Amino acid sequence: MRRRTWWLVGCAGLWIGAAAGKFEPPPTFLASSILPPDLVKGLHYEVAEAVTAESHYQTFQIASPYGDLRAEGRSVLVTRLLEFDALARLDDVSKTAVFAKAAGGAVLNVGKGVVNVVTAPEATLKGVGSGVKRFGVNLGRKGKRAVTATEAVGEGGENDKSTGAKAGEAAGHAALSIVGVNGAARKWAKKLNVDPYTSNPLLHQALVSLGKIDTAGRIAAIIVVPIPVVASATSTVGGLVWDADPEEVRKVNERRMGELGVSKLLADRFFKSPAFTLTNATRFIGALHSVMVPGCDDYVSAAAESEDERDALFFVESAELLAGLHQAQPVRAILVDSRTLVVKMDGARAIAFLPFDYVYWTEALARSTIEIAARARKELGARFLQIDVTGTATTKAKTGLGAAGWKVKERVTEGLLVKPAGG
């Protein structure tokens, strides 16, 4: 039956592609045309003009005096630019006489000593990027991955690997962002208003170095750091990741998982995922916990399949869009066995979330959205279908999605802790 369904979906996808015109290739952009001037170039960074958009995320190259980074996605770009601002403020503070005296002569080299990390082709620079290409292939059902009890609880055998070991095998190494971050480093992250568990190797190294210099956090207590104009996502998660140690944060997340109805087996698999930083895991779980409707536990299972941090952010941002919608109008249920978060609303409506920068028409998108539409009608009883996109969609994409029954709503950002860079 599944094979017959896929055959029908495939035929329908090709028909809709023909009806909407040719499928579209990955586009390119100029940063100066799609971003406000102050985001293209600031005091401490400059975004390269050439911008690509594979897998519906615009990819930016950022140069700064502290090192160069890539940002895949407009929300990631915002985070990285705020982090470069934090590095500049920290650089200025570390050169003051007050800091030098308090640090006993210890020197903080902001952005130095990690050049090999950000230039190595397989290193953290790739952390937010590579795995998301599978979303261009399948936005529909989850993978059929078998999970054994041994793997989940980690009791011996080939699959018995620590979180750190598993993280080392992942493209993004997101889980390694916790290494070396002590209480003092978290205090400095709070002063700088940044994520203490960032996967940005430049900022991570600076925070770890600060933690070694200021082991008790006493310097952080006496040093004044200029407050940034824009708040970071971390400041909106209750300060939990700043004020509590990782084990305490983990316990809060585990409790919330249990209240969502997530089994211990699944929770363990999620927490062992190398794709989620501690902060992103907290964002994801917190967003689902604020909704608490049938299907939330199943979406944790989908998120646990994430291959790298960009993958994980797709689920984080989808869950935050869900929380934003639920605040305005009640969500009744979530479509199970789906990578795309699709929710049932009152009035026989279904809404799907695509936290993408730029939706263009592809055969893969056609196949997935046709499948999701059919399942939303059958399993959620929906008669009216809507796709909420955080960015924009091309005319061909909207035509093709419309032919599949979807109404497209663009620039939907309610609930996101990091708003995409505007233009």
Image: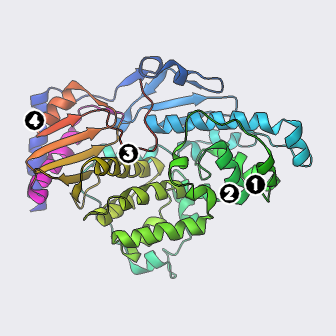
Magenta highlight on residue 380: yes
Three-letter amino acid code of the residue under disc 2: Val
Residue at position x 43%, y 35% from top? 420
Three-letter amino acid code of the residue under disc 3: Gly
Camera-near label (4 vs 3) is: 3
What numbered label is drawn on residue 403? 4
Where's the C terminus, which quadrant? top left
Q: Earlier in the sequence, mark 2 or mark 1?
A: 2
Dividing the picture into quarters, in which one does residue 143 lie? bottom left
Which residue is the site of mark 1?
A: 211
Residue 275, position as x, y percentages in the image? 48, 56
Which residue is the site of mark 3?
A: 415
Element marked by disc 3: loop
Instruction: Look at the image and give the residue range highlighted in magenta.
Output: 357-381
Question: Along the horizontal axis of the image, is 83 left or right of 300?
Answer: right
Which residue is the site of mark 2?
A: 181
Q: How busy is the neighbourhood of tag 3: few (under 14 within 10 Å), some, or many (20 plus)?
A: some
Element marked by disc 4: helix
Camera-near label (2 vs 3) is: 3
Dividing the picture into quarters, in which one does residue 255 lie? bottom left
Camera-near label (4 vs 2) is: 2
Furthest-bottom residue in view? 155
Pointers 3 and 1 in contact (C-beta within 8 Å): no
Element marked by disc 1: helix
Question: Along the horizontal axis of the image, is 219 left or right of 82?
Answer: right
